[in-house]
Image: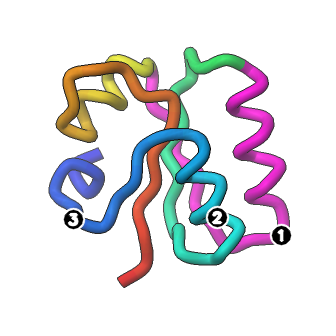
Amino acid sequence: MERLKSSKKRIIGLKQTIKAIKNGSAHTVYIANDAEDSIKNSILEVCKGKEVEVVYIDTMKKLGEACDIEVNASCASLLND
């Protein structure tokens, strides 16, 4: 999670994460375990066949904190350099 906090090349949120996976710019995706199943499933579906590392975080609150934002986050991703 430290990589997520310190990285300048990150995005937060479902739409942006899915877009980054589809266009090949995301290398690691973080998903909160307590996010809605529909959110988790849609991200995992897009990850199929892509070389994207999937990391699960306990809660949306912890993921938001790891992103250094003051709200909960269901997903985030790190982008390629």
Q: CA distance from mark 2 to mark 1?
A: 11 Å
Q: Position of residue 9 (x, y in %)?
A: 30, 67
Mark closest to the chain's N terminus, 3 or 2: 3
Q: Would you place residue 59 above or below residue 76 in this image?
A: above
Q: Amino acid at mark 1?
A: Gly
Residue 41 sits inside the magenta stretch: yes
Q: Would you place residue 56 above or below residue 46 in this image?
A: above
Q: Amino acid at mark 2?
A: Ile
Q: Which mark is residue 8?
A: 3
Residue 73 sits inside the magenta stretch: no
- Residue 50 picture quarter: bottom right
Q: Amino acid at mark 3?
A: Lys
Q: Nearer the viewer, residue 2 or 7?
A: 7
- Residue 24 picture quarter: bottom right
Q: Position of residue 49 (x, y in %)?
A: 83, 69
Mark closest to the chain's N terminus, 1 or 3: 3
Q: Residue at x 58, y 61 (%)?
A: 53
Q: Position of residue 34 (x, y in %)?
A: 56, 15
Q: Which residues are magenta?
A: 37-58
Q: Residue at x 78, y 55 (%)?
A: 46
Label 1 neighbourhood size at 10 Å, few (<14), some (14-19), many (20+)?
few
> Of circles 1 and 3, which is in front?
3
- Tag 3 and tag 2, C-beta contact below 8 Å: no
The residue pinned by badge 2 equals: 21
Q: Residue at x 50, y 61 (%)?
A: 28
Label 2 neighbourhood size at 10 Å, few (<14), some (14-19), many (20+)?
many
Q: Quick one: SS at disc 2?
A: helix
Mark closest to the chain's N terminus, 2 or 1: 2
The residue pinned by badge 1 equals: 49
Q: Which mark is residue 76?
A: none
